[in-house]
Image (spheres, helix red, strand yellow):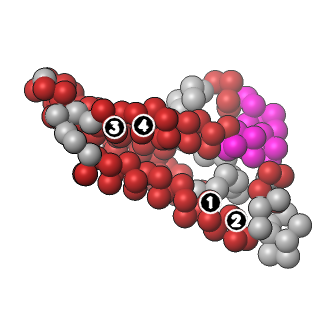
């Protein structure tokens, strides 16, 4: 174990060097930023030629951003790029959803790419963002199960994704 690594660090993170942990911390948000760059520079066909789809996309994107921001607010000091935490957050939106930040991110990008009619964006969402968020959710589940055991399992049993 590294010198300045907290005792409650999840097992899978203990193997990461500080440099690799920093790289992951920087890489994950960069993948979301890349999605925004794709939205800006890729060809667009707003709403795939359907005004109603563009408006639906905007509504879905705004709902996703709202969920994403609300979840971050409820996380407070527990917000981190890498899994682990000092407490289990089960209030607010976390009463219903275990991973509202990831769901909010997914809905935000789905709405954005639908609104601008970006086939490339939809592909990026399906091939990069969704798998990334599922992998992050699984790692987070593993870390929280290691740390909180039966308490987390009971929470997991009564919530959705």
Relative side of 155 to 159, left or right: right
Give whichever of discs 4 and 1 has the lower sequence position: 1
> How far, Cα to Cα, is label 4 from label 2?
25 Å
Q: Is residue 153 visible?
A: yes
Q: Which residue is mark 2?
A: 20
Does the stretch in magenta take in 145? yes
Mark 4 touches mark 2? (CB < 8 Å): no
Does the stretch in magenta take in 96? no
Residue found at the very far right of the displayed protein? 1
> How far, Cα to Cα, is label 3 from label 4?
9 Å
Of 92 and 142, nearer the camera is 142
Residue 128 screen position, x and y as percent? 50, 40
Which region shows up in magenta?
139-154
Q: Which residue is mark 4?
A: 125
Q: In percent of the image, x 89 and y 67: which residue is there?
A: 1
Q: In percent of the image, x 25 and y 51: which residue is there?
A: 41
> How far, Cα to Cα, is label 3 from label 1?
25 Å
Q: In percent of the image, x 68 and y 32: which residue is there?
A: 155
Mark 3 touches mark 1? (CB < 8 Å): no
Give whichever of discs 4 and 2 has the lower sequence position: 2
Mark 2 touches mark 1? (CB < 8 Å): yes
- Mark 3 against mark 2, which lies toward the viewer? 3
> How far, Cα to Cα, is label 3 from label 2?
30 Å
Residue 69 screen position, x and y as percent? 39, 49
Mark 4 touches mark 1? (CB < 8 Å): no
Residue 71, placed above or below residue 2: above
Mark sitting on residue 24: 1
Q: Which residue is mark 3?
A: 120
Residue 23, placed above or below residue 84: below
What is the magenta segment's predominant secondary structure? Answer: helix
Secondary element at image label 1:
helix
């Amino acid at each position: 174990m590294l010198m300045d690594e907290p005792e409650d660090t999840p097992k899978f993170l203990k193997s990461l060097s500080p440099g690799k942990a920093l790289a992951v911390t920087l890489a994950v948000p960069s993948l979301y930023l890349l999605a925004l760059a794709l939205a800006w520079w890729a060809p667009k066909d707003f709403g795939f030629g359907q005004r109603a789809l563009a408006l639906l996309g905007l509504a879905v994107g705004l709902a996703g951003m709202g969920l994403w921001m609300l979840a971050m607010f409820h996380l407070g000091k527990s917000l981190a790029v890498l899994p682990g935490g000092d407490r289990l957050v089960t209030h607010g939106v976390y009463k219903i959803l275990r991973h509202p930040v990831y769901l909010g991110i997914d809905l935000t990008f789905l709405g954005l790419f639908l609104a601008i009619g970006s086939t490339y964006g939809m592909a990026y969402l399906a091939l990069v963002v969704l798998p990334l968020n599922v992998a992050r959710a699984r790692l987070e589940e593993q870390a929280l199960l290691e740390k909180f055991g039966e308490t987390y399992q009971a929470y997991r049993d009564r919530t959705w994704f």
